[in-house]
Image (cartoon, rainbow, N blue to C red):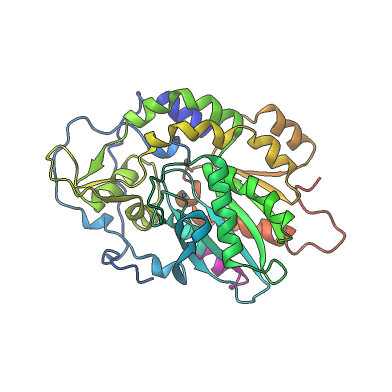
Amino acid sequence: MSNLYRSALGARLAKLPADIPSNDDDEEEEESGDSLSSLPGSGLGPPAMQTKVKKDPNPAFAPILAKNFFVQAVQIALPRRNLDCRAYYTPPLEAHGTVMVCQHGAGYSGLSFACMAKEITDMTGGECGVLAIDARRHGKTVSTSDQPDQDLSIDVLVNDFVEVIQTVYPDPQASPSLILVGHSMGGSIVTRACTMLLDEKYKIGGVVVLDVVEGSAIEALPHMNSLLNARPDGFDSVEEAVEWHVTTKTIRNSTSARISIPAIISPSESTSPTVPPFIWRTPLRSTAPYWQSWFAGLSNKFLAVRTARLLVLAGTDRLDKELMIGQMQGKFQMVVVPGTGHMLHEDDPTRLAEIMVDFWRRNERAVVGIKKVGES
């Protein structure tokens, strides 16, 4: 049974863990001025405590600057999409190297890939770059339209993603080779975008989907509102938001949480005593009309992409029929990462980076004439 589905079924039964992981990282000042996108599933964590006592921020969960994990943060103007898109980028050493383009899950941001990105660039000696994108209505991507911008349907998100690639790399022939990496909702985005980019003659070295299977995701949808009810409405401080994600084991790596979580909350700017000082930047309940579109048809599209395919799961998932047949036919590579949750790339960024780099070495560097892993 998928990690996503287990969490949905157990949302009302889960208890807040008593253990609070210690953190030996040096404290760093909160990001300011930027010196430098999952279906609501297991990444939402167990139910919040019903009675809440305001407490001082815990410095052990203070934010960590992203500048130590990416070379630069950039705002990418997409006038045709009415977006000013935030991306975090570490380019490869060589212009014709490889870039892993990462798309986050619902409610998160490109910074969820920060620790993994640094591990990838370190392991490859800079041969592989990483580009992590904040999706529409997520992180620090902002709309430039005067009209309300609520649409998170899959076609809109895919077209946004493709437009970012075409803006950053306008010439497909001069573009580095791209490996598309997507977590949960992001996995559906990159899978669909792959075909469009191949049609535009971009070099796609592979597609990597992190912890989402169509069958399990669709089964979990009826339970999502119960899971959302388990979430706190907001937090008294950024540190409290980080601490909640760590203590509930939503994210099992406190360093990654200290980098990624500040980007997914924002000041409420409300004077009402019933509204917390910090609220979710992307209210997941508002994305409910789009959940079905994110995952319907994902298995078929994943198996049909004309490049190498990798599925990485947090647990022994129940593959749907299409994926089960595809796996038996050797159409994709599958890796299970034990000891992680839905946010597996944050929980164990070193292991995920090892898997990504191995995938790159076996496929992107494959000898001409030898079929890539996962290719039919």
Note whether 328 is above or below 127 in the view shown.
above
Residue placed at 68% from the left, 60% from the top?
360
Q: Magenta part of the protein: which range?
A: 118-129
Image x and y of residue 143, in percent:
41, 54
Image x and y of residue 250, in percent:
39, 41
Residue placed at 13% from the left, 41% from the top?
272
Number of numbered discs overlaid on the protein picture: 0
Res. 215 image quadrant? top right
Residue placed at 50% from the left, 46% from the top?
344
Query: Looking at the image, which is closer to me, 125 or 288?
Result: 288
Asked if the stretch drawn in magenta spans residue 122, the answer is: yes
Image x and y of residue 219, in percent:
54, 24
Res. 62 image quadrant? bottom left
Horizontal side of residue 85 vs 21, given as left or right: right
Image x and y of residue 233, in percent:
26, 37
Residue placed at 41% from the left, 42% from the top?
150
Horizontal side of residue 51 vs 287, given as left or right: left
Asked if the stretch drawn in magenta spans residue 320, the answer is: no
Residue 313 seen from this side: no
Quadrant of the image containing the C terminus = top right
Quadrant of the image containing the N terminus = top right
Query: Looking at the image, which is closer to me, 164 or 321?
Result: 164
**Which residue is situated farthest in the right direction here?**
369
**Which residue is situated farthest in the front direction here?**
146
